[in-house]
Amino acid sequence: MIEVLQALLLGLVQGLTEFVPVSSSGHLVLGQRLFGWPHSLNMPFSVAVHMGTLLALLVFFREEWVALIRGFFTSLTTRPRDWVFDQRLAWMLVLASIPAALAGALLGDTVEAHLQTPAWVAVFLAVGALAMLAAELWGSRSRGFDGLRASDAGIVGTAQALALAPGISRSGITISGGMLAGLDREAAARFAFLISAPVIAGAGLWEGQKLARSGLGGNAGVFIAGFAASAVTGFIAIKLMLAYLRKHTLAPFIIYRFALAAVVILVLAVS
C-alpha cells in the first residue's frame, strides 16, 4: 500500500512538472532522494509515468493529432510547395524529433548513470532558468502558432535534445527555444508540447524493449497508479499552462528554479 501511495505522488509530480517548466526528471530525482524511496522504482516506473503524460498529450491535442496524421499522409502525394499548414506542421514535428532521438540513443545511458544526482539537478535547474530568462529578455514574440517556420522546428528540436539532462526541463527549454526563435509564449508552448509527444513515445518504446528483456518486476499496482496519476495531472497542467502563457511571463518559474537550485546546493553543502 505504501508503494502505491508513493507511486501516486510521484505520478502527480511527473504529470505536473512535465508541462510546467520546472523539470519533471529533476523533481523525481529530488523527490526520491528526499523521501528515501527505492531506486528500484526508477526505470520501469519512469516508463509508466511518461506513458501517462503521453496519454495526456494525445487526449488534449486529439483534434490536432487527427489533422496532423492526415496531413502527413496527404503530404506524400502533394508537392511540398503546395502543402497546407497541417502538412507542413506534420513534417516540422518529424524534423524537431530527430535531435532528441539521436541524443537519447547516444547519451541516454550515460546521463542515467552519471547525472541523476541532486548536485547535477541543481546545476541544470539554474542553467534552464538562465535559458528561460534569455527568452524573456531577447525573444521578439512576434509570431503566433500559424506563423511557424521550418527553422523553428530545427531550433526547438535542438533545444529539446538538451532536456535529456535532469533539471533542464523539456517544456522549459523548448518553450525558451521557440520564444528566442520569435514565437509568442502560447505558440511556443503549444509547439513544445506537440513535439514532445513523439520523443516521449520513442523513449517509452526504447526503454520498454529493455524491460521486455529484463522483466518488469515490482508491483503492477505501482505502475498503474503512477500511470493514471501522471495522465490526469498532465492533462490539467497542459490546459493551465497554455491559458497562463496567453497573458503572463515565465518569471515565476524562473524564480522558482533559481530558488530550488540554491536550496539543493545549500543542503548538499551542510550535509
Image (cartoon, grey):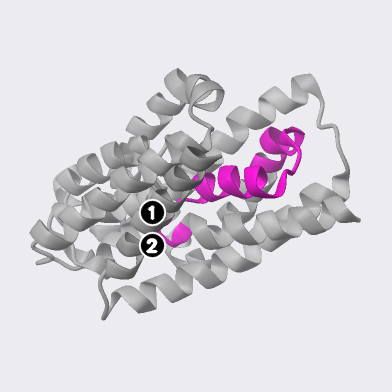
Can you say which quadrant of the picture contains the N terminus? bottom right
Q: Is residue 92 left or right of residue 118?
A: left
Rendering quarter of residue 41: top right
In percent of width and height, residue 249 lies at 25, 72
In percent of width and height, residue 125 lies at 38, 47
Q: Is residue 261 left or right of residue 154?
A: right
Q: Amino acid at mark 1?
A: Ser
In percent of width and height, residue 204 lies at 60, 37
Q: Amino acid at mark 2?
A: Tyr
Q: How many discs mark residues in the rendered view?
A: 2
Secondary structure that dominates the magenta span: helix
Q: Is residue 38 left or right of residue 104?
A: right
Give whichever of discs 2 and 1 has the lower sequence position: 1
Q: Is residue 29 magenta?
A: yes
Circle 2 Cα neighbour tier, 10 Å, few/some/many (<14 / 14–19 / ≥20) = some
Residue identifier under label 1: 171
Numbered disc 1: secondary structure: helix
Q: Is residue 77 visible?
A: no
Q: Is residue 175 magenta?
A: no
Q: What residue is shown at x 19% (from left), y 44% (from top)?
A: 80
Q: Is residue 159 visible?
A: yes
The furthest residue to the right: 1
Rendering quarter of residue 162: top left
